[in-house]
Image (spheres, grey):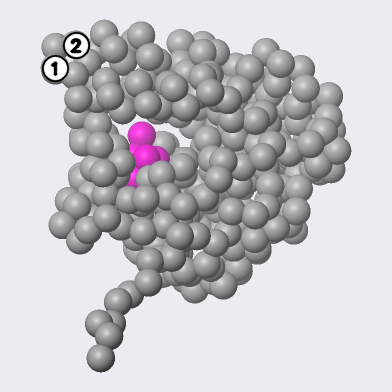
Amino acid sequence: MPENRTRVRRDVGRWVDDELRDRYFAAADVLHAMGAPIRSETDVETGFGTTHVYRYGPADPAAESRTPVVLIHGAGYSSAMWFPNTPGLSLDRPVYALDTPGDANRSVHREPMWRPEHAARWMDEALGALGLDRVHLVGSSYGGWLVLNQAHRRPERLASVTALDPGGLEKVGLRFFAWVFISLFASFAPKALRPRLAAWLDQPVLAIPEMREWIQLGARAYRIRRPAPLPLTDDELGSIRTPLYVVMGRHSLLLHPKRQLERVPRLVPGARAEIIAATGHGPQIDHPDVVNARMLAFMDDADTPERPAAL
């Protein structure tokens, strides 16, 4: 009899081994503990796999009826990246953080969802399974592409969209991939050098030991199986009618902030775009209080559309 072997699919993400996966989950739990208390965790089923969801706040029970915030993390990792933001965002709104299937997290990836129409269907199914009919959607980096794509393709559940130094506006260039590689290499540098490297690379995670360990473990433990997303065309971006706020780091290497500062409001009616100084690809990590406050003000204005959005 031939030996039974489990075929490894090459179109879905996978863990390298169980021991590294468990160490990565433990490191992620450390980051979660640095943020707001998790009220609950749940799994919802979609056509692309099981999506793991974290629920936070609000601190005031009377605010349970407010339009919730939904957070979509960047490529490769998990909702643990939101630990600097969950305390402020969950003060007076319910907050949900979704682990995107296909990245290193507690979701289970079964079917590829990198095509734009599939990604939009996954998110719509996940929000529907959570019973969320109207949300303020926030995405960072690759998550930024996901939320822009959602606003273009399936905006029915969206009260607003905030994209933080997002993919989806420009083709991902060599300079960004080089920055990611150098940053990962720099995470193994001697402790005394890390603050200097963090400043030079505009990479704050190098100076946060818990986050540095989490990123190192994720890079070792998980294999992503998807191509970089193509940016939205001018026509696709111009189709968006959901209130849109784009936040970019002045030193971003994913996109050209000044170019998008002009382009986004020109193409998307009523959209706002802003550049945050003294940061690169992680404005919400470098300046969580500032970015939280501006996102919440934007969401408040989106909930009262008779008033012009103010930032």
User: Looking at this view, is 159 or 12 the one in front?
Assistant: 12
Q: Position of residue 74 (x, y in %)?
A: 47, 41
Q: Is residue 30 left or right of residue 224?
A: left
Q: Position of residue 85 (x, y in %)?
A: 41, 36
Q: Position of residue 133 (x, y in %)?
A: 65, 63
Q: Is residue 296 left or right of residue 4?
A: right
User: Looking at this view, is 200 or 6 the one in front?
Assistant: 6
Quadrant placement of the C terminus: top right
Question: Which secondary structure, mark 1?
Answer: loop
Q: Which residue is mark 2?
A: 193
Examine the residues drawn in magenta and state their main secondary structure. Answer: helix
- The amino acid pointed to by label 1 is Pro
- The amino acid pointed to by label 2 is Leu
In the displayed structure, 90 sits above or below 141; it is below
Q: Which residue is mark 1?
A: 190
Q: Which residues make up the magenta segment?
A: 80-84
Question: Which secondary structure, mark 2?
Answer: helix
Q: Position of residue 65 (x, y in %)?
A: 56, 59
